[in-house]
Image (tube, grey):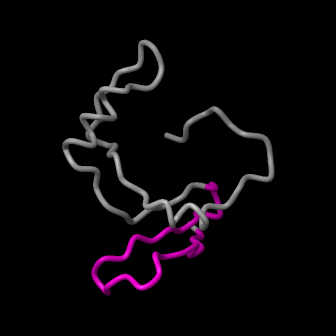
Amino acid sequence: MRLRFLGIIPNTPIDDSPTLWLDEDTGDLLIQTYRATPDEVAACQGIGSVPGHSTNVPDHETIVRLPAVMLKFIPRSEGPDSDTPRS
Protein backbone atom coordinates (compact mmCIF):
# COMPACT_ATOMS: atom_id res chain seq x y z
CA MET A 1 0.00 0.00 0.00
CA ARG A 2 1.42 3.36 -1.04
CA LEU A 3 -0.20 6.14 0.97
CA ARG A 4 0.03 9.82 0.24
CA PHE A 5 -0.84 12.42 2.88
CA LEU A 6 -3.49 14.78 1.51
CA GLY A 7 -4.30 17.13 4.35
CA ILE A 8 -5.22 17.84 7.93
CA ILE A 9 -7.53 20.47 9.42
CA PRO A 10 -5.25 23.43 10.10
CA ASN A 11 -4.68 24.60 13.66
CA THR A 12 -6.12 21.51 15.33
CA PRO A 13 -4.86 20.31 18.70
CA ILE A 14 -2.31 17.48 18.73
CA ASP A 15 -4.93 14.88 19.68
CA ASP A 16 -7.86 16.21 17.61
CA SER A 17 -6.78 16.17 14.01
CA PRO A 18 -9.01 14.86 11.20
CA THR A 19 -6.66 13.75 8.41
CA LEU A 20 -6.93 12.39 4.85
CA TRP A 21 -4.63 9.99 2.99
CA LEU A 22 -4.88 8.55 -0.53
CA ASP A 23 -4.06 4.92 -1.28
CA GLU A 24 -2.22 5.45 -4.54
CA ASP A 25 -2.64 1.78 -5.52
CA THR A 26 -6.45 1.73 -5.30
CA GLY A 27 -7.47 5.40 -5.31
CA ASP A 28 -9.27 4.86 -2.00
CA LEU A 29 -9.30 7.55 0.67
CA LEU A 30 -8.36 6.74 4.25
CA ILE A 31 -10.08 9.12 6.62
CA GLN A 32 -9.33 9.88 10.25
CA THR A 33 -12.22 12.00 11.44
CA TYR A 34 -15.09 12.25 13.90
CA ARG A 35 -17.48 9.34 14.45
CA ALA A 36 -21.07 10.13 13.66
CA THR A 37 -23.18 10.41 16.79
CA PRO A 38 -26.02 7.94 17.37
CA ASP A 39 -28.47 10.71 16.40
CA GLU A 40 -26.58 11.35 13.14
CA VAL A 41 -26.52 7.64 12.31
CA ALA A 42 -30.26 7.41 13.00
CA ALA A 43 -30.86 10.44 10.75
CA CYS A 44 -28.84 8.82 7.94
CA GLN A 45 -30.84 5.62 8.36
CA GLY A 46 -34.06 7.64 8.30
CA ILE A 47 -33.13 9.21 4.97
CA GLY A 48 -31.90 5.92 3.50
CA SER A 49 -30.13 5.59 0.18
CA VAL A 50 -31.69 3.65 -2.71
CA PRO A 51 -35.04 1.83 -2.69
CA GLY A 52 -34.77 -1.69 -1.32
CA HIS A 53 -31.29 -1.19 0.18
CA SER A 54 -30.85 -1.84 3.89
CA THR A 55 -30.27 1.16 6.15
CA ASN A 56 -28.41 -0.98 8.70
CA VAL A 57 -24.73 -0.19 9.17
CA PRO A 58 -22.86 -3.52 9.06
CA ASP A 59 -20.19 -4.26 11.68
CA HIS A 60 -17.44 -3.82 9.07
CA GLU A 61 -18.66 -0.31 8.14
CA THR A 62 -19.21 2.95 9.98
CA ILE A 63 -20.55 6.45 9.34
CA VAL A 64 -18.10 9.29 9.87
CA ARG A 65 -18.48 13.05 9.78
CA LEU A 66 -16.05 14.77 7.41
CA PRO A 67 -15.75 18.50 8.17
CA ALA A 68 -16.49 20.63 5.09
CA VAL A 69 -13.07 22.29 5.31
CA MET A 70 -11.53 18.90 4.44
CA LEU A 71 -13.32 18.64 1.07
CA LYS A 72 -10.60 20.76 -0.54
CA PHE A 73 -8.11 17.93 0.10
CA ILE A 74 -10.10 15.26 -1.78
CA PRO A 75 -8.57 14.59 -5.20
CA ARG A 76 -10.88 14.59 -8.21
CA SER A 77 -10.84 11.59 -10.53
CA GLU A 78 -9.39 12.21 -13.95
CA GLY A 79 -10.88 9.01 -15.39
CA PRO A 80 -14.38 7.65 -15.78
CA ASP A 81 -16.35 7.06 -12.58
CA SER A 82 -16.75 3.50 -11.36
CA ASP A 83 -19.96 2.20 -9.85
CA THR A 84 -18.29 -0.95 -8.57
CA PRO A 85 -17.62 -0.83 -4.82
CA ARG A 86 -14.32 -2.16 -3.52
CA SER A 87 -14.72 -5.11 -1.15
| Horizontal arrangement in the rendering, residue 19 relative to residue 74 (left or right) | left
* Residue 66 horizontal/vertical position (percent): 43, 57
* Residue 27 horizontal/vertical position (percent): 63, 56
* Residue 22 horizontal/vertical position (percent): 58, 65
- Which quadrant does the N terminus fall into? bottom right
How many numbered marks are there?
0
Looking at the rendering, the stretch of residues picked out in magenta corresponds to 2-27
Which residue is more in the foreground, 45 or 60? 45
* Residue 72 horizontal/vertical position (percent): 61, 65
Above or below 54: residue 60: below
- Residue at 39% over, 66% down: 32
- Residue at 42% over, 12% down: 52
Per the image, is 12 magenta? Answer: yes
Above or below 78: residue 70: below
| Horizontal arrangement in the rendering, residue 57 relative to residue 20 (left or right) | left
- Residue at 60% over, 73% down: 4
Q: Residue 14 sits in which quadrant?
A: bottom left
Q: Residue 81 sits in which quadrant?
A: top right
| Horizontal arrangement in the rendering, residue 50 relative to residue 62 (left or right) | right
Per the image, is 7 magenta? Answer: yes
Which residue is more in the foreground, 51 or 61? 51
Which residue is more in the foreground, 86 or 46? 46
Q: Residue 35 sits in which quadrant?
A: bottom left
Residue furthest top in the image: 52
Above or below 48: residue 22: below
